[in-house]
Image: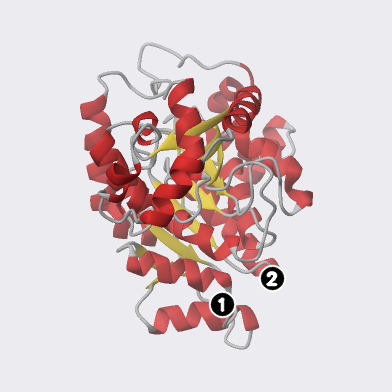
Amino acid sequence: MDQEQKKYWLALNTISGLGVNGLKALIEVFGVPRRIFSASFSELCAVPGIGKTIARRILRFDDWGGQDKALAYYEKEKISLLSWQDGLYPPMLSQIYDPPALLYAKGTLQEHEKCIAVVGSRVASTYGVFVTERLCRELAIQDITVVSGMARGIDSAAHRGALAGKGRTIAVLGSGLDTIYPSENLSLSHRILEHGALMSEYPVNTPPQPRHFPARNRIISGISLGVVVVEAGEKSGSLITAKFALEQNREVFAIPGAIDAPGSKGTHKLLKEGAKLVETVDDILDEISSHLDQINDSRSMSSNRPDGVQKQRPTACGDPELQGDEMTLWRQLRNAPKEVDELIALTGWPCQRLQSILTMLEMKGYIQKMPGSKYKMKE
């Protein structure tokens, strides 16, 4: 989308009451947004779904200086504007009942991205945070992008888990991208931008308002193959996301908790209603496997080159092309499988550093995890 197109899209997005269906009808008739503002009153009223009130609002719009100023800001802050016609607009999102006419995104988006949403209570238990971080780390290792809302509690743990797995994560905000809420997640938002994206349907200078969060939940589920609810009270906003997921024909998963814990009320209700119970990441992968195959086929058709660095495995001819700590650790596994504690003793590294390097080697296909926290060279 060039700068001129962006200006007209921004203008249309500010017109109250237009909505995505009305905008789609206008685009179908006039082709590009610029021609909409050149149309006559009678031409606008002739478009299905566009009445006299909306037509007058379009004709009266004159804040072009404001749109130029906004565009300059978006360009400076590297914020992308995506209409449903853009290749990076999430294709699954465009298929829901009321997709955003315009998305604001910062960071990196990918075509044919495989996404799973992980949401839950803002008042999370230690168990909930632990399970969420572990699950999302494992999803990231499997090349699944973790989507959440960057709220306190489970949402934040979901993003952290994906980052710990050296994977991608997307945060959908209930405010403009210039407002990080809660403010304590500012540092987390910077890490997300390095390995994923922040996304919103709201322009800058839009504060976080209570009504925005239920609305943004339809986007969280809309861009995802399924929604995992970790902890949720009986009136949790996470249940709204699960409801959207069902309406959008997405998979719904839930993680069980203690029967007397308040945070288990919502998840256990979902399980009673037919949500898939999750104990390990395989419970999710097995359920979405057919969808993953379709996405992989789409990736293959859209590009003849691999995404990212090719995985290179060791061969009989010698050592793999690894350097530094990765080579040091790989050589420790050359002769026999070893447990994590044994590797800590051999390398002298802290557990967190060791686990990070093990994860990278596993993702690159050089090693594989065995039962009992053992690792071995991949054959």
Q: Quadrant of the C terminus?
A: top left
The residue that label 1 is drawn on is: 257
Q: Report whether residue 336 is seen.
A: no
Residue 229, compared with residue 59, is above or below; it is below
Q: Is residue 160 visible?
A: yes
Q: Name the residue: 70% across, 60% down.
A: 152
The one of 209 and 308 positioned closer to us in this rendering = 209
| Residue 332 location, quadrant | top right
- Give the amino acid type for the residue marked by disc 1 in the picture: Gly
Of the residues shown, which amino acid type is indicated by label 2?
Ser
Observer-nearest of 259 and 347 = 259
Query: Residue at left 55%, top 38%?
Result: 197
Quarter of the view holding residue 300: top left
Q: Could you tell me which residue is drawn at 65 percent across and 54 percent down?
A: 156
**Mark 2 Cα within 10 Å, few/some/many (few <14, many 20+)?**
some
Tell me whether circle 1 and circle 2 mark residues in contact (CB < 8 Å).
yes
Measured as percent of width and height from the top left, residue 92 is found at: 33, 48
Left or right of 180 on screen, residue 237 = left
In three-dimensional space, the C-alpha distance between marks 1 and 2, rounded to whole angstroms, equals 10 Å
Q: Position of residue 122 (x, y in %)?
A: 67, 66
For disc 1, the neighbor class at 10 Å (few under 14, some 14 to 19, many from 20) is some
User: Mark 2 or mark 1, which is nearer the start of the sequence?
Assistant: 2
Residue that label 2 marks: 125
Q: Which image quarter holds the N terminus?
A: top left
Residue 369 % position (x, y): 47, 44
355 to the left or right of 229: right
